Image (cartoon, rainbow, N blue to C red):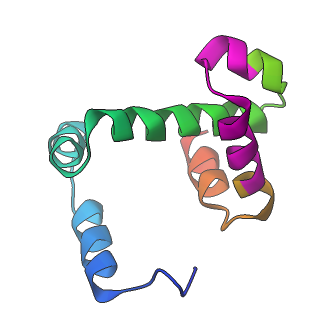
Amino acid sequence: MNKKIKSVTLDQLFEGILNLESKKECYQFFEDLCTIPELKDMALRFEVAKRLEAGESYQSITDYTQASTATISRVAKSLSYGADGYKLILKRLK
């Protein structure tokens, strides 16, 4: 966990998220919390992470997702040097 971002308000946000009970509730909450472009960007990064973990090439990922190479590189860096959040979720979804 990155101590630079830890705060009481972020803890409360995460507690709230952990209390969502369905996909429908997630849609309701995140649609209020984020802009539609922000949600689409997060979903894109998650798709990129899935494809990188599956061993796909940058070109293949770009062709399928239309993600920029900068986005793919940022996600790849997170997969290699980040907090392992992507890996945690991807493992649980298998």
The total number of labels drawn is: 0
68 is within the stretch colored magenta: yes
Closer to the camera in the image, 80 or 17: 80
Q: Residue at x 26, y 41 (%)?
A: 35
Residue 46 rendering spot, x and y as whole percentages:
55, 39
Taking the image as shown, residue 57 lies to the left or right of residue 34, namely right
Quadrant of residue 14 within the rendered picture:
bottom left
Residue 82 rendering spot, x and y as whole percentages:
70, 64
Q: Which residues are magenta?
A: 61-77
Quadrant of residue 7 within the rendered picture:
bottom left
Closer to the camera in the image, 78 or 53: 78
What secondary structure is the stretch in magenta mostly built from?
A: helix
Q: Residue at x 21, y 55 (%)?
A: 20
Residue 56 rendering spot, x and y as whole percentages:
81, 25
Closer to the camera in the image, 34 or 19: 34
65 is within the stretch colored magenta: yes
Q: Residue at x 32, y 80 (%)?
A: 11
Closer to the camera in the image, 22 or 44: 44
Taking the image as shown, residue 24 lies to the left or right of residue 40, namely left
Q: Residue at x 85, y 24 (%)?
A: 57
Q: Which residue is most to the top? A: 63
Quadrant of the snapshot with the C terminus:
top right
**Does 44 appear above or below 30?**
above
Taking the image as shown, residue 41 lies to the left or right of residue 88, namely left
Quadrant of residue 83 within the rendered picture:
bottom right
**Does 83 appear above or below 53?**
below
**Does 34 appear above or below 14?**
above
Quadrant of the snapshot with the N terminus:
bottom right
